[in-house]
């Protein structure tokens, strides 16, 4: 007995040691020689200033030279990552953490309740349905069958009002170009031909006759993934007719707009059209189907602010607007006289930013209070009925439904709590847990703390810092600082399985709510646009200095990460303050600020950025911070892994290609400069689970290796 007991104790001790087994970084990892990237003789002249662009040839994504360069760079990157001793351990841990059932909030269409579900490691979420809460679940649509490798995804789905017809979009390889398929809900049989070349579009049914959709003319010259697109057009597709006979409803040469969208009010009386030439501000039009032959009526005929029709009660219109209300308000008017001079406040503007939704005949006002959710329920006359009790401080989303719904669903999450679905009773204002995920993660061991730090010009900026309880603030914690800061987009708390890898290693995850975003409304957004864009970078740099000053970390243990506009943020920050960061991850970034508007729909970003064609002053400002142009010969830059994808037709990969080529040329230190280029992937949406896990594995492995912190196995 004693021998057996001793053996058991020894076994337990051994197991404990295995759980704490640390795998050291390998200081002998070497980067293979970078490809000899040729330099061309290209010079542009902007307002009398010559600007060299020797890597212009990398903009041609159709050329064999570019394809060969991509292959050579990926070989260097894969060789380096393959030498990291704990890379596979991170991958296995991530796969283990990811492998849990994930269920989306249900919604009702026709006789069925629909919901999305991923059983754990499926590449794409599957749409299920059942008749009533107690009905038998069945697979309705499985996007995993769109392609053999999981690189095609569901890009949108829309049901006709009676739920009998369904139109859905498929994105192939992550492209923004999609195709649309129509099926009967009853038997899933296909109706008519597949629509091709749909882009930046919803699918808005009008009865069972057909639906509205938006697209561009596909470029006939150059690459469909990078050529400039203009004149977004709204069409009506009548079922069982050829796409080339679809009626042009709005847009095109007569009313040229870069972005045109459409939807119908729930009773299908009004067709609502929004039109914009940038990502901020829109015109608003309605067409009244109760009056045969009526034309569009302008509700708002300028693009200075954002507006949308929320719903109607007969001729009464409920409108969300930022006119005279930077934080948003809800107003009412009539379709007979819908212009702003007739608007009356229903839910006035407050100090918090408003995002309204409707369901069950109620208005749900989802406010942002210091980047976290506060939700109130109003009746349709603007009377407050309930302030909804949320499970904690974090992000609540949902609260949408049909007018006759008695209950709604919403999700709640934050940086330490996985997204949980709640059922909400509209009459009582009470909620109950509907679906809670079973993640192999104990949130009680971690905490999030919101701080307000001071930026360069004295502005107070919020940041949420998440870490394991009890960590020492001694400057040694590996830290990831994430930001975005643009396009009125708000970063609110959300759980990420990937971030568990950092947190359980004793690391720190920090998210700064920078100017340029929407956390404090349109004024906060405007403070980070055009000639004020430097405020965004100053805010991010100040966040890094705060984390170092408060000893959460040090410059040797600090990484920065961001995607798209956030990739610009990382690129600008690392070129302005290279000594402040050890590791940098600019992902799918806008990195050539002089030419971004010449690709795909990039010209629509001019509201935030301005363009190099606007004026000598605007050109000079852009040229100063443009990451590709701000790189300096002989500078010691952070260890950098640029991340992009070959099918990204939102921010074309040429931005990343040119930046990486010049960074490899100019970097004088020993820090590696890699570019990781996904194939058959786009800007990010629809990426398969396998690709996401591989990407996140490489990210954490690269960070831990270059911080020389190694990896402690977690069992």
Image (cartoon, grey):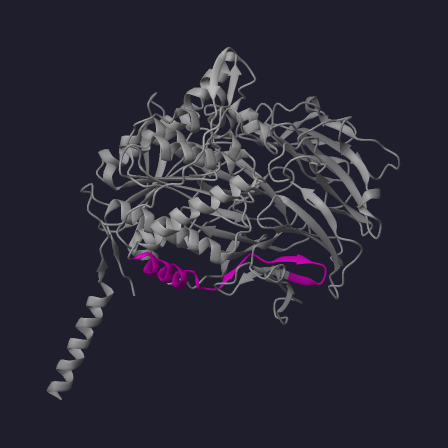
Residue 344 percent location from the top left of the image: 65, 28
Horizontal side of 56 relative to 258 (left or right) equals left
Indicate the position of residue 485 as horizontal and vertical percent values: 45, 32
- The residue drawn where x is 59% and y is 53% is 427
Image label count: 0
- Residue 541 belongs to magenta span: no
| 195 to 142, vertically: above or below | above
Q: Is residue 402 visible?
A: yes
In this rendering, does residue 417 appear at all?
A: no
What residue is shown at x 18% (from left), y 42% (from top)?
Answer: 474
The N terminus: image quadrant = bottom left
Q: Residue 308: which quarter of the image?
A: top right
Q: Nearer the viewer, residue 245 or 440?
A: 245
Examine the structure image and report whether residue 95 is included in the region drawn in magenta: yes
Tell me residue 8's x, y (percent): 18, 80
User: Which one is nearer the viewer's eye here, 375 or 670?
Assistant: 670
Q: Residue at x 37, y 35 (%)?
A: 664
Could you tell me residue 320's position as x and y percent?
A: 62, 33
Say which of 502 and 523 sits in front.
502
Residue lying at 60% horizontally and 26% vertically, measured from the top left: 305
User: Residue pushed farthest top?
Assistant: 48
Residue situated in front as seen by the camera: 113 or 345: 113
Residue that extends furthest to the left in the rendered view of this protein:
2
Residue 370 falls left or right of residue 344: left
Give the residue at the far right of this rendering. 293
Q: Which residues are magenta?
A: 86-113
Residue 276 picture quarter: top right
Work out which quarter of the rendered image holds the C terminus and state it: bottom left
């Amino acid at each position: 007995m004693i021998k057996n007991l001793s053996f058991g104790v020894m076994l337990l001790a051994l197991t404990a040691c295995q759980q704490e087994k640390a795998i050291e970084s390998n200081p002998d990892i070497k980067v293979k020689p970078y490809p000899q990237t040729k330099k061309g003789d290209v010079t542009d002249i902007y307002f009398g200033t010559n600007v060299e662009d020797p890597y212009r040839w990398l903009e041609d994504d159709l050329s064999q030279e570019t394809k060969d360069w991509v292959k050579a760079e990926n070989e260097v990157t894969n060789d380096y990552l393959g030498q990291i001793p704990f890379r596979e351990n991170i991958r296995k841990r991530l796969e283990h953490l990811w492998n849990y059932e994930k269920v989306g909030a249900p919604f009702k269409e026709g006789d069925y309740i629909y919901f999305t579900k991923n059983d754990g490691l499926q590449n794409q979420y599957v749409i299920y349905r059942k008749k009533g809460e107690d009905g038998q679940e069945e697979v309705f649509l499985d996007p995993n069958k769109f392609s053999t490798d999981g690189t095609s995804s569901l890009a949108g789905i829309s049901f006709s009002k009676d739920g009998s017809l369904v139109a859905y979009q498929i994105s192939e390889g992550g492209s923004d170009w999609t195709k649309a398929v129509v099926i009967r809900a009853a038997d899933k049989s296909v109706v008519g031909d597949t629509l091709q070349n749909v882009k930046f579009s919803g699918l808005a049914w009008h009865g069972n006759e057909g639906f509205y959709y938006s697209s561009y003319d596909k470029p006939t010259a150059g690459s469909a993934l990078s050529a400039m697109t203009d004149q977004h057009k709204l069409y009506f597709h009548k079922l069982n007719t050829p796409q080339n006979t679809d009626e042009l409803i709005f847009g095109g040469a007569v009313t040229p707009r870069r972005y045109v969208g459409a939807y119908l009010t729930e009773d299908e009386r009004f067709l609502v059209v929004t039109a914009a030439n940038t990502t901020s501000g829109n015109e608003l039009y309605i067409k009244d189907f109760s009056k045969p032959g009526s034309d569009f009526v302008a509700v708002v005929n300028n693009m200075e602010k954002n507006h949308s029709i929320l719903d109607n009660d007969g001729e009464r219109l409920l409108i969300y607007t930022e006119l005279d209300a930077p934080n948003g308000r809800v107003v009412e008017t009539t379709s007979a006289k819908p212009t702003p001079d007739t608007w009356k406040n229903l839910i006035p503007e407050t100090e918090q930013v408003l995002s309204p939704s409707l369901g069950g005949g109620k208005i749900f006002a989802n406010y942002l209070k210091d980047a976290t959710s506060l939700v109130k329920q109003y009746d349709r006359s603007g009377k407050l009925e309930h302030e909804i009790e949320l499970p904690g401080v974090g992000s609540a989303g949902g609260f949408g439904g049909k007018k006759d719904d008695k209950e709604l669903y919403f999700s709640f999450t934050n940086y330490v709590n996985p997204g949980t679905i709640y059922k909400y009773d509209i009459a009582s204002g009470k909620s109950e847990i509907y679906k809670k995920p079973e993640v192999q993660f104990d949130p009680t061991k971690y905490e999030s703390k919101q701080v307000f730090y001071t930026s360069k010009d004295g502005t107070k900026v919020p940041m949420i810092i998440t870490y394991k309880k009890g960590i020492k603030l001694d400057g040694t914690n590996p830290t990831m600082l994430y930001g975005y800061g643009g396009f009125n987009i708000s970063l609110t708390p959300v759980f990420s399985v990937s971030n568990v890898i950092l947190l359980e290693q004793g690391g720190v995850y920090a998210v700064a709510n920078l100017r340029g975003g929407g956390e404090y409304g349109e004024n906060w957004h405007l403070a980070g646009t055009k000639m004020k864009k430097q405020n965004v970078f100053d805010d991010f740099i100040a966040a890094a200095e705060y984390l170092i000053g408060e000893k959460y970390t040090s410059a040797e243990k600090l990484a920065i990460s961001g995607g798209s506009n956030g990739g610009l943020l990382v690129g600008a920050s690392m070129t302005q303050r290279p000594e402040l960061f050890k590791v940098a991850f600019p992902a799918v970034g806008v990195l050539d600020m002089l030419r971004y508007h010449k690709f795909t729909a990039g010209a629509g970003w001019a509201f935030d950025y301005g363009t190099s064609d606007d004026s000598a002053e605007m050109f000079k400002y852009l040229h100063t911070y443009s990451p590709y142009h701000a790189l300096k010969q002989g500078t010691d830059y952070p260890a950098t892994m640029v991340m992009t994808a070959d099918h990204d037709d939102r921010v074309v990969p040429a931005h990343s290609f040119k930046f990486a080529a010049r960074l490899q040329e100019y970097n004088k230190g020993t820090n590696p400069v890699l570019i990781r280029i996904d194939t058959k992937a786009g800007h990010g949406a629809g990426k398969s689970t396998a690709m996401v896990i591989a990407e996140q594995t490489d990210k954490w492995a690269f960070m831990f290796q270059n911080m020389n912190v190694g990896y402690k196995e977690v069992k």
